[in-house]
């Protein structure tokens, strides 16, 4: 009676619960029916009546045990058949024929069996029990009972099948929702990877191409070759790519390396804090590097400031300069320097990035991330 692995979770749980309920219901119901049936037994057949009640008690104990544990379902079937056969076969001695005790025991058992066993089991069992009844009370009386018994069994089976199909539909809907959620998660992950790759491309190869196009005649070819090799290493994952394990990283040490290699003078203000996940530290480092590169290219100044502050579980990194500034609303959508290499990169790790600037008023890039 354990849930079948071939069924979905909802359907399997319904089947298990239905079989438990049928066993418990039959055990309790037949006990109550037998108590009232014993009251109608003639005095000279009282010994037989008590023997039948004893059989009902034993069968009820088996039903309750099977309903609680879900084991020995075949034993419950044997006791169910034995109780009905005994009461029906002796109904001429325990009361009028047809006997209401026998009739109620038969119909209750036939109905509950529809929720425990398939028709290949219940059909021959119910037919055999009906034969016992006919043998005891005669074909004329049994012929009247037959249609009633058939209708009750069919309705019980129909209700069981409808509820089982409802559970099956719920399993199908759940599986469909799970598949859609998985597909959405994969799509988001792919989009995030695409954005990261575009940001890497902007930070590496496109920067080298721009250097070659604008200053190629004045730049050492070896320097360009070295830059191209570093770009290739980053883009192929050999160097500087996101870590596969989000191990803790010291943000201050990582940013110090960026500041030391910046193309302008950087006034850095560090505030030591707890280590950050590698993916977060990587996003912050690359965003700071891009902000410093943008300052060197466009701000018209040779100095910038970088500050790192911690507020509880939050880390705030600010890159500012006193350059000529710009209007953020006029930055074209095709430009990936701010949107791709800074804003989307921070969004990808659950952080935020805000760029504040105005013509003649300098530029400030504020990067925030919190573990809460």
Image: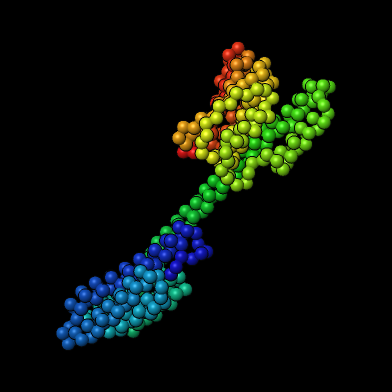
Q: Quadrant of residue 265?
A: top right
- 19 or 183, which is in the foreground? 183
x then y, percent, for residue 281: 58, 37
Residue 87's spot in the image, x, y percent? 29, 81
How are the colours assigned in the image? rainbow
Residue 93 in the image: above or below residue 256? below
Residue sitting farthest toward the top:
360
User: Residue 141, how many percent across, how many down?
Assistant: 30, 78
Q: Residue at x 60, y 23 (%)?
A: 267
Name the side, left or right, on which 150 lies relative to 210: left
Rendered image quadrant of residue 31: bottom left
The residue lying furthest to the left in this view is 43
Residue 165 visible in the snapshot: no
Left/right placement of residue 148 relative to residue 51 reads right
Identify the residue at horizontal 39%, vertical 63% (top origin): 17
Determine if residue 14 is in view: yes
| Residue appearing at x 68%, y 39% in the figure | 240
Picture mark count: 0
Q: Which residue is drawn at 53% across and 49% down?
A: 178
Residue 231, picture quadrant: top right
Q: Which of 14 and 146 is in front in this view?
A: 14
Image spot of residue 201 (x, y percent): 71, 33
Q: Nearer the viewer, residue 320 or 186?
A: 320
Left or right, 200 with respect to 272, comes to right
Q: In which quarter of the image is the N terminus?
A: bottom left
């Amino acid at each position: 009676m354990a849930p079948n692995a071939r069924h979905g979770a909802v359907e399997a749980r319904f089947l298990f619960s239905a079989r438990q309920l049928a066993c418990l219901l039959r055990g309790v119901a037949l006990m109550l029916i037998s108590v009232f049936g014993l009251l109608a037994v003639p005095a000279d057949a009282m010994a037989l009546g008590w023997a039948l009640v004893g059989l009902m008690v034993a069968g009820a104990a088996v039903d309750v045990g099977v309903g609680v544990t879900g084991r020995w379902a075949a034993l419950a079937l044997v006791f169910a058949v034995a109780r009905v056969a005994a009461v029906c076969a002796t109904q001429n001695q325990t009361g009028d024929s047809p006997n209401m005790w026998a009739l109620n025991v038969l119909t209750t058992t036939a109905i509950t069996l529809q929720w425990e066993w398939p028709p290949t089991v219940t059909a021959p069992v119910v037919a055999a029990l009906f034969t016992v009844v006919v043998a005891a009370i005669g074909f004329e009386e049994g012929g009247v009972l037959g249609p009633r018994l058939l209708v009750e069994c069919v309705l019980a089976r129909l209700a069981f099948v409808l509820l089982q199909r409802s559970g099956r539909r719920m399993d199908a809907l759940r599986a469909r929702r799970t598949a859609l959620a998985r597909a959405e998660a994969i799509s988001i992950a792919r989009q995030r990877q695409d954005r990261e790759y575009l940001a890497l491309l902007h930070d590496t190869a496109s920067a080298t191409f721009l250097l070659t196009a604008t200053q190629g005649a004045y730049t050492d070819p070896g320097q360009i070759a070295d830059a191209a090799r570093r770009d290739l290493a980053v883009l192929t994952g050999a160097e500087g790519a996101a870590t596969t394990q989000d191990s803790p990283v010291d943000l201050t040490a990582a940013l110090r390396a960026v500041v030391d290699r910046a193309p302008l003078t950087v006034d850095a203000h560090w505030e030591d804090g707890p280590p950050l996940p590698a993916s977060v530290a990587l996003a912050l480092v690359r965003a700071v590097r891009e902000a410093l590169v943008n300052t060197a290219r466009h701000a018209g100044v040779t100095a910038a400031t970088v500050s790192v502050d911690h507020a509880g579980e939050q880390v705030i990194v600010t890159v500012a300069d006193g350059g000529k500034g710009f209007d953020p609303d006029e930055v074209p959508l095709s430009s990936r320097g701010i949107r791709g290499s800074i804003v989307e990169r921070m969004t990808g790790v659950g952080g935020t990035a805000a760029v504040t600037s105005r013509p003649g008023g300098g530029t400030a890039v504020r990067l925030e991330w919190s573990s809460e």
